[in-house]
Amino acid sequence: MFFFFQIIKKMKIAIEGCCHGELDRIYETINQIENDQQIKIDLLLICGDFQAIRNEHDLQSMAVPPKYRSMQDFWRYYSGEKRAPVLTIFIGGNHESSDFLIELPYGGWVAPNIFYMGYANVVNFNGLRIAGSSGIYKSHDYNSGHYELPPFDEKTIRSIYHIRSLDVYRIKQLQQGQIDIMISHDWPRGIVWYGDTQRLLQRKQYFQQDIESNQLGSEPLEEVLLKIQPKYWFAAHLHVKFSALVEHTNGQLTRFLALDKCLPGRDFLQVKIVHFLAEFRLFFSIDISIFIIGS
């Protein structure tokens, strides 16, 4: 006979906005925080634009102007020259090594201790349930399948990172209130109304028209937010720090945080202590509920 019991756990999680291949700087920042505060970070979540560049060929599959195509840091972790000092989980954004990530549509390890979540996925780390959605929303590709294949042309090098209705549908089947953390690149549409909108506009004045027309953010991710109601939602993409608190109609709360890109003097990383209810055991696994309707 087996007995399982649940306890309230807490985990120290570092959240990174847009990575842009700056793994060394991110891990150095985490190490500095650990030394200054005398703590140990349990997990790093990266909200897109990871740029898993293995070699110079991979640079050709990244949708950026040529002047921004740089090897950056990941290849050293891929080759084994370096190892990620903390378990790192990331989703894709709109500046990625698509030649590499297309090989892992359902997620997988891209280097020791670095895990990619694929198009849409749920993982379970020591009882903490983390859902993720890669890419950004463009309505003209939303109802297409994942038809892109390398070598990419001028169209498919961009359409490959556009989210699809099938992947959003899978995420929306998750049981309401049972996801601890959701990570995405895009912001959910409408999230700006749950935080300090005026302060956001002071920093990003050109957001005003999109905010007034309710076009800032992703409409499908707004649906996900209202449907699964995760306890936390972390995002990036818009290169500005913004926090919000969503109180759903049933009283459930979602704490939202978006962070900047990894540059000196920017708000690109933050550590949060997350409390959650979980079984008393230690593990990391794919959460099979993403593949089961109605979980």
Image (cartoon, helix red, strand yellow):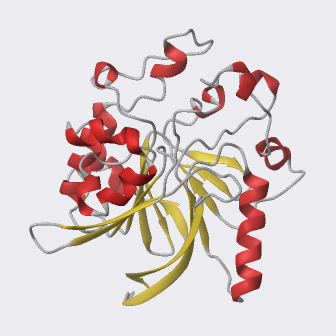
Q: Residue furthest right?
A: 81
Number of labelled discs? 0
User: Residue at point 44% right, 75% down?
Assistant: 127
Where is 184 relative to 84, above or below? above
Q: Residue furthest left?
A: 249
Does residue 83 appear to the left or right of 245 in the view shown?
A: right
Q: In which quadrant of the rendered view does residue 277 lie?
A: bottom left
Residue in front for this viewpoint, 242 or 121: 242
Q: In which quadrant of the rendered view does residue 100 lie?
A: top right
Q: Is residue 257 visible?
A: no
Q: Quadrant of the N terminus?
A: bottom left
Where is 182 relative to 232, above or below? above
Q: Quadrant of the C terminus?
A: bottom left
Q: At which x and y percent is residue 133? A: 41, 45
Q: At which x and y percent is residue 56? A: 81, 25
Does residue 215 appear to the left or right of 182 in the view shown?
A: left
Q: In which quadrant of the rendered view does residue 97 lie?
A: top right
User: Residue at point 48% right, 58% down?
Assistant: 241
Q: At which x and y percent is residue 183? A: 43, 55
Q: Residue furthest top?
A: 153
Residue in front for this viewpoint, 244 or 221: 244
Residue in front for this viewpoint, 9 or 69: 69
Q: At which x and y percent is residue 89? A: 58, 56
Q: Is residue 100 visible?
A: yes
Residue in front for this viewpoint, 228 or 245: 245
Where is 221 relative to 288, above or below? above
User: Residue at point 52% right, 51% down?
Assistant: 47
Does residue 93 appear to the left or right of 248 in the view shown?
A: right
